[in-house]
Structure formats: C-alpha cells, structure tokens
Image (cartoon, rainbow, N blue to C red):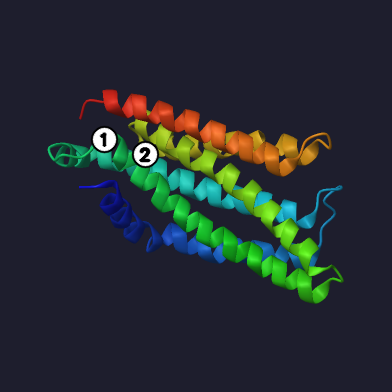
Amino acid sequence: MSLGLLYKDELRGYYKSKTMIVLFVGMPLISIFMHFLQPDAEGIPISTLVALLVASLGGTLSSVMLSTTVVNEKSRHVYELFLIRPIKRFHLLLAKFLAVYTCLLIGTIFSLSIGLTIDYFTLEIPLDVILEGAADSLVISLAAMAISCSMGLLIGVLTNSVMLAAILAIYAGNQFSMLAVLPGVILETLDPVLFSLAIGLSATIVIMGINYFVFEKKQF
C-alpha cells in the first residue's frame, strides 16, 4: 500500500471524526468572537492573537487525537497486520500526520477567512493590509500546529497508556509548540513570520526524524 493510499484512508477517517467536527466549528467561532470583542492584546495584532488561539485549540486537539490513536492501534496490534504487507513503517505515521494537518489547514484557512471578512466590513483597513495580516497569521498558526502534530505522534509512539498520552499531548505537545513560536510574536527584534516558519519547519523535521527512528525500532 502506497503512502498516497494510506493518506487517503487516514483522511477519510479523520475529517469525519468528532474531534475534527469540533475543530471546524470551534476555530471559526474563536475567530468571530475575538474580532468582535477586540480585546486588549498588549500590542499584539488581533489577527496574530487569533492565530495563536486557533493554533492552540487546533494543536491541542490534533495532538491528543494523534497520540491516543497511535496508542490504541498499538494495543489492538493493528500495526502487526500492516507490517506483514510491503508497507514502509514510517509511511503509517507520515500518513496520519499529513491527514490531520490537511484538516487543520482547511479549518485554519476557514477561520482566518472569517476574521478577514469581519475586518474588511467593520474596520477601515485597506484590503491589502488585511490580506497581509491574514497570511502572516496563517503561517504562525500552521507552524505551531505542525510541531503539535509531530509531538502528538512522538508521544503516541513512546507511550502505551491512552490517558498518559492524552495528558502529555495537552501539557507537553501543545505547550512546546506555542513556546516555539511565541518569541517571534513578543520580541520586536524578530520577524514573527520568518521566525515561526523557521522554528516550525526545523522542529517538525527533527521530531519526525525521531519518530522515524523510534518507530523503525519498535517491536510489535
């Protein structure tokens, strides 16, 4: 079974799951509430604050879902059935990562598009400025969520308890991803987009590399 077929199979399962339904509803609601409430963000643009909140919600739920799914599949000996076929081990994890990340990408774009539309009709801000802010927010969100997803897989690979996996995904996976991108948002000397992109890519590649190494050595 190729990576493409594994990806399609995982995608069908994830986008119909209750977790993804919560994300597709919850993330747009956060965007709507934040843009209408216009809270005091202490100098942080509202679009960036919304991006961080969306990334936190999406990253947490996706990390928990990935980690607990891997633990459940290990306990049910699912991988033993896969590995008797000519399937590369890492493709099983990569397909999960790509499927969840695709759902997150769709949900994030939808959420930020709602915020962009609200800003366009309620604020006297040029469209090009709004689009630039939305693009920056999208990069920050996706960078943080890429780290969360890769951490969720790592936690699932390393643990054998569903409860422990969920706790670690909430308190370790998501917190690590947010701490990775926050310096670029808070520190004026850093470009938040370039910093988030660099940290997101490098951290995700390193963590997925660890996933590859550990999963290849696992005995099922």
> In the displayed structure, would residue 95 be above or below residue 216?
below
Residue 171 coordinates in the image, percent (x, y): 55, 36
Does label 1 or label 2 sit earlier along the sequence?
A: 1
* Foreground of the two, 2 or 22: 2
Q: Residue at x 28, y 50 (%)?
A: 6
Indicate the secondary structure of the residue bearing disc 1. Answer: helix
At label 1, counting other C-alpha atoms closer than 10 Å, the crowd grade (few under 14, some 14-19, many 20 or more) is some
Give the image quarter of residue 128: bottom right
Q: Residue lying at the far left in this picture: please name it.
A: 84
Of the 4 image quadrants, the one containing the C terminus is: top left
- Please tell me the numbered disc located at residue 89: 1
Give the image quarter of residue 73: top left
Residue 147 coordinates in the image, percent (x, y): 53, 38
Residue 192 coordinates in the image, percent (x, y): 73, 42
Q: Residue at x 64, y 34 (%)?
A: 180
Q: Is residue 172 visible?
A: no
User: The residue under label 2 is which amino acid type?
Assistant: Val
Judged by depth in the image, the label closer to the viewer, 1 or 2, is: 1
User: The residue under label 1 is which amino acid type?
Assistant: Arg
Q: Residue at x 39, y 30 (%)?
A: 211
> In the displayed structure, would residue 126 be above or below residue 212?
below
Dot 1 and dot 2 residues touching (CB under 8 Å): no
- Please tell me the numbered disc located at residue 7: none
> Is 38 displayed left or right of 111 in the figure?
right
Q: Residue at x 41, y 45 (%)?
A: 97
Give the image quarter of residue 8: bottom left
Provide the residue designation for mark 2: 162
Q: Residue lying at the far bottom in this picture: please name it.
A: 121
* Foreground of the two, 126 or 119: 126
Indicate the secondary structure of the residue bearing disc 2. Answer: helix
